[in-house]
Image (spheres, helix red, strand yellow):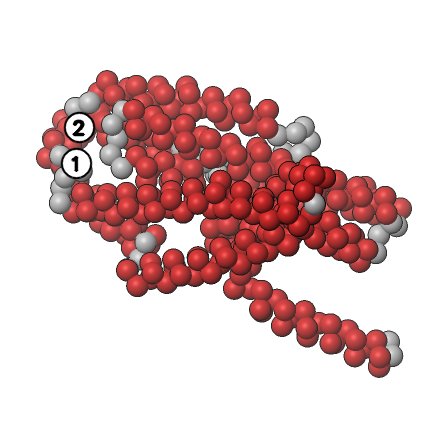
Amino acid sequence: MNEQKGFLIVLTGLLAAISFLMLQPFMGYFLGAALLAFILHPVQVRWRKYLGSTISSLLIVFLAIFVIVAPFLFTATAVIDDAQDLAGDVRQSDLINSTQIENKIHELTGQRLDVEKNVERAVDRFTNLTLGNFSQLLSLIANASIGLTVMLFLLYYMLKDGEMLVKWLNSLIPLPEEITRNLHSKMSKTTWAVIKGHVLVAIIQGLVAGLGLMATGVPNSVFWTFVMILLGFIPIIGTILVWLPASVYLFLVDKPLMGVLLALYGFVIVGLTDNIIRPLAVERGADLHPAVIIIGVLGGVYIFGAVGLFIGPIILGIFKSVLVVFEKHYKSL
């Protein structure tokens, strides 16, 4: 290696490190914009035939604001309000008749349990963990506003110039064109499989389970629906962690019919959303093992924050695609 090549490598590495540090605070929003651009790209391809690349990309960004961002912000506000109401109700003992539940538990088990104290402690821990104090909440809202603005700008340029970026990146890959196309196809197929077979199913499953909570009169059902959507990303465990305890709660507050109906609704209707929709949504050969999904969800949230729920499994799915292409073509290189 001569001095010129060495200098170029060092300069490239230094600038890459600085660029990464500049991008790191917005990494979650950058990945979120890339994911939205991937999902909305087929729409942009159709619209640009009639409107051009610039106008079609701009219209799709406005569409994303009204269809995705605005409902998300409204839902987030409703969830926060419901969570605060839940915490207030527990502290004021308005949510549960603790004496009634304690007597029922004593009848069934012979054990005395301070329900109110234990529930209040659990809710305090949860609300402190998820919402924090008021100043932290304001800081979170401010950061999210800046991040969402950056994400929308990135979404526009990724839709408008995304194909040029992909072609440029493909030109940098030192692989034969056939292998590059195969790799791109595998990655695209796996990404769509995760989006349709895990993200979409988790949202539908959480919403369907939430309707059951609302219909049977479970308090703070908006908050618990949000929790079930998050739990829906975790295979096997899923929404049962909410609706089954909720049916037990209804039984303990002398609403046994509602409790039985909610349990039946959960096992039959909510279960069908996973057993029927997931196989229809996932293309054969593109699905990921449940263990990979769990690691992707938990690891993604740990590294990227909330957007990691979606990005984590996709990254592991792309890694799987790379391994498949590597195994298939390595000997021919």
Mark 2 nearby-residue class (10 Å; few <14, some 14–19, many ≥20): some
Give 241 or 159, whichever is nearer the viewer: 159
Residue 152, how many percent across, how many down? 54, 53
For label 1, the residue is: 96
In the figure, residue 224 lies in which quadrant? top left
Residue at horizontal 18 percent and vertical 43 percent from the top: 89
Give 79 or 13, whichever is nearer the viewer: 79
Residue 289, how many percent across, how many down? 59, 36
The furthest residue to the right: 332
Residue 64, how many percent across, how many down? 53, 44
Residue at horizontal 53 percent and vertical 42 percent from the top: 63
The furthest residue to the bottom: 3
For label 2, the SS is loop
Image mark for residue 177: none
Give 225 or 56, whichever is nearer the viewer: 56
Is residue 237 visible in the rendered structure shown here?
no
Please, what is the three-letter code of the amino acid marked with disc 2?
Val
Name the side, left or right, on which 227 lies relative to 30. Answer: left
Please, what is the three-letter code of the amino acid marked with disc 1?
Ile
The quadrant of the rendering that contains the N terminus is bottom right
For label 2, the residue is: 253
Mark 2 vs 1: CB contact within 8 A: yes
Name the side, left or right, on which 151 lies relative to 130. Answer: right
Residue 203 to residue 22: above or below = above
Name the side, left or right, on which 77 lies relative to 103. Answer: right
Residue at horizontal 68 percent and vertical 73 percent from the top: 15
For label 1, the SS is loop
